[in-house]
Image: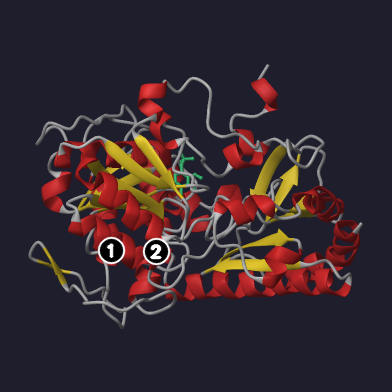
Amino acid sequence: MIPGGVDSPVRAFGSVGGAPRFIASAQGARVTDSEGHSLVDLVCSWGPMLLGHAHPAVVEAVQEAAARGLSFGAPTETETLLAEEIRRRVPAAQRVRFVSTGTEATMTAVRLARGATGRDLVVKFAGCYHGHSDGLLAEAGSGVATGGLPGSAGVPAPIAAQTVVLPYNDVAALEECFLARGSSIAAVICEGAPANMGVVPPRDGFNEAIRRITEAHGALMILDEVLTGFRVDPAGWWGLESRGGTSVGSGTAPTMLHGHNLDVPGHPGTPRWVPDLFTFGKVVGGGMPLAAIGGRSDVMELLAPLGPVYQAGTLSGNPLATAAGLTTLRLADDAVCARVDEAATTVASILSEALDREGVPHSVQRAGSLFSLAFGPEAAAHSVLDYAQAKAQEVWRYPAFFHALLDGGIAAPPSVFEAWFLSAAHGPEEFDRIALAAPSAARAAAQ
Ligand code: PLP
């Protein structure tokens, strides 16, 4: 009945072979399939389940909201509280608009950038995934990378021509592109840290360079934090860099943006760069369909009904979704992010040590609490830094590795081009189970 048996291609086992399990229920760090097998879940719904599955406080908030009505198509208090919670963490999100999916958030951010600048071109990086809107599918990561596709059929050539694709982590290529076409470029969109071609950490200062170059040419910077937002740090990837957690380059530190203080409460350090627009998704909805665009008030107020840039949605800011998101964010504090970070370190080292014992060359690709594995001597010699390197790895090692883990009760992402997701519910029992399954998975990857 359902094409490929899935509602999103990343769920299919296209690149690893076999058929995906049907999931009947989930609790904490485990999912249970329809045949009753309990699996340690390292997918976490592709990111949203930072607190683990069916967290009692989140479930209760959704139940209470449901009892008050499923959707009103009118403003609610919860959406305002959630917008304020986002701004508290990310002060540069001076205004916030809620939508239902990350795809809508990035699509709207791009439209806003075009509306604000009067320019058409958008720059994205090869291997980054920003959802499935027409203009952003070129050389996209995630399922497009897994399927080995250059983009998607059905995208008209004139639309594809409005997207310029550059190699990630390459400041020179970005500078060259802006020298040649800068006056036509509306925005550069980038993931905080790419995690859709496997995890690829930004080189020190790369995000800051994007900021410097876009600003010099009057283009906007859109930081896509759909995946990284509120997961790698309570203030997302931008927050992690701001507090010096990683990849902080040099430069003048902006402390004010359009009259607003950018200091993040509880965050030592000052942001060295600030994008014009952010997109959030996944954790922001705590497992319910919710995403958001945030950013400079002068740009955000170009959105209808205040301005000429149109965006709408019957279920946008849905009361159940905002209840789940607000409860999740209120719980997702420093301690939770630190715990998830530690869990990622533990799981990555269990897997990496098992692979080392079998002599399988690999690198652990790490950005904050996100990690993935890249296989082959090239990856082992120097971490993967762009899409060309990600594609050049020994991808053929992954299917056997994945299936051996699955046979051992561990549900890893069914593609080497996806990040592995942990939650605050992953603990010693799950680590022990992963440690039991890891040796045979490593042996399978060695063959
Ligand atoms: N942006 C990034 C960085 C993502 O990882 C994703 C989804 O994985 C999206 C956008 C699209 O979000 P959604 O799947 O909610 O449309």
Residue that numbered label 2 is attached to: 236
Q: Residue at x 14, y 51 (%)?
A: 297
Whether residue 279 appears in this view of the structure is: no
Of 31 and 232, which appears nearest the observer? 232
Which residue sits furthest bottom? 268
Task: Inspect the image, locate mark 1, and give the three-letter code of the amino acid beneath it.
Answer: Val
In the picture, measured across the screen, residue 76 lies left or right of residue 256, that is right
* Relative image position of residue 164 (x, y in whole percent): 38, 41
Of 340 and 296, which appears nearest the observer? 296
Q: Residues within 10 Å of mark 1 (few under 14, many from 20)?
A: many
Figure label count: 2
Q: Residues within 10 Å of mark 2 (few under 14, many from 20)?
A: many
Place residue 351 in its image quadrant: bottom right
Task: Inspect the image, locate mark 2, and give the three-letter code of the amino acid beneath it.
Answer: Gly
Q: Quadrant of the C terminus?
A: bottom right
In the picture, measured across the screen, residue 337 lies left or right of residue 145, that is left
Whether residue 86 appears in this view of the structure is: yes
* Relative image position of residue 289 (x, y in whole percent): 44, 39
